[in-house]
Amino acid sequence: MVKVIIICVIDYIIRRDIVIVAAGIAGLTASFGLHRLGIRSLVLESSDTLRIARFALSKWENAWKALDAVGVGHILRQEHAQLMGQQTSAMRFKESGNQQTDREIRCVKRNLLLEVLANELPSGTIRYLSKVVAIEESGFYKILHLADGTAIKTKVNNMCDMKNTLRS
């Protein structure tokens, strides 16, 4: 009797130039900014959904400039009123003296900020249940090993490498 053994080899290696670990505010904003430049990225999130905590953040002028730069400031302004009080902490909303300058300060719900960013990304950009358990160096590449057995081969492993990749 002849025994036939069939071995199935499944390739669990995914190749991506840019991988961002964690779908928080910084990760989603970075991915969306790259998307607007026509650069694909993959966002790995260890949980099964966005981690939406029920709290708010005060966003000042520079944060709104950054949100405008990536293209979501106008969406968030519709949902969040500008604060018009006299003072918060040690900063005044309006400058005193001859030149009065309004500061744009809004309290933003974190869950809405994350949802707006995630909804603006192409389908499949965020990969949920993707916990990184190890990172292996392989020449010019990094291989990210996930808890589910998947390996992701990437050229970019930090912001310095990303800047060099974007320049070339």
Image (tube, grey):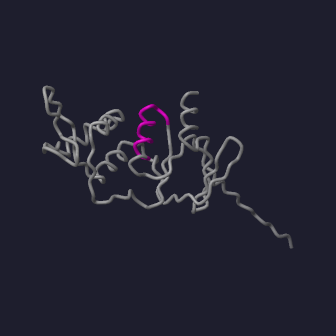
Give the residue displayed 75% in from the left and 63% down from the top. 6
Q: Is residue 92 left or right of residue 2?
A: left
Q: Height in image: 163 above or below 26?
A: above
Q: Which residues are magenta?
A: 27-39
- Does the stretch in magenta take in 41? no
Overall secondary structure of the magenta section: helix
Give the residue displayed 27% in from the left and 57% down from the top. 55
Q: How many marks?
A: 0
| Rendering coords of residue 148 (x, y %) | 57, 62
Q: Quadrant of the N terminus?
A: bottom right
Give the residue displayed 60% in from the left and 49% down from the top. 14
| Rendering coords of residue 119 (x, y %) | 35, 46
Q: Is residue 16 left or right of residue 101?
A: right
Q: Nearer the viewer, residue 93 or 97?
A: 97
Q: Quadrant of residue 72?
A: top left
- Does the stretch in magenta take in 29? yes
Q: Quadrant of the C terminus?
A: top right
Q: Is residue 119 left or right of residue 3?
A: left
| Rendering coords of residue 126 (x, y %) | 45, 50
Q: Quadrant of residue 37?
A: top left
Q: Nearer the viewer, residue 153 or 124?
A: 153
Q: Nearer the viewer, residue 7 or 145?
A: 145
Q: Height in image: 167 above or below 61?
A: above
| Rendering coords of residue 38 (x, y %) | 46, 32
Taking the view exactly as shown, the residue that stands out farthest to the bottom is: 1
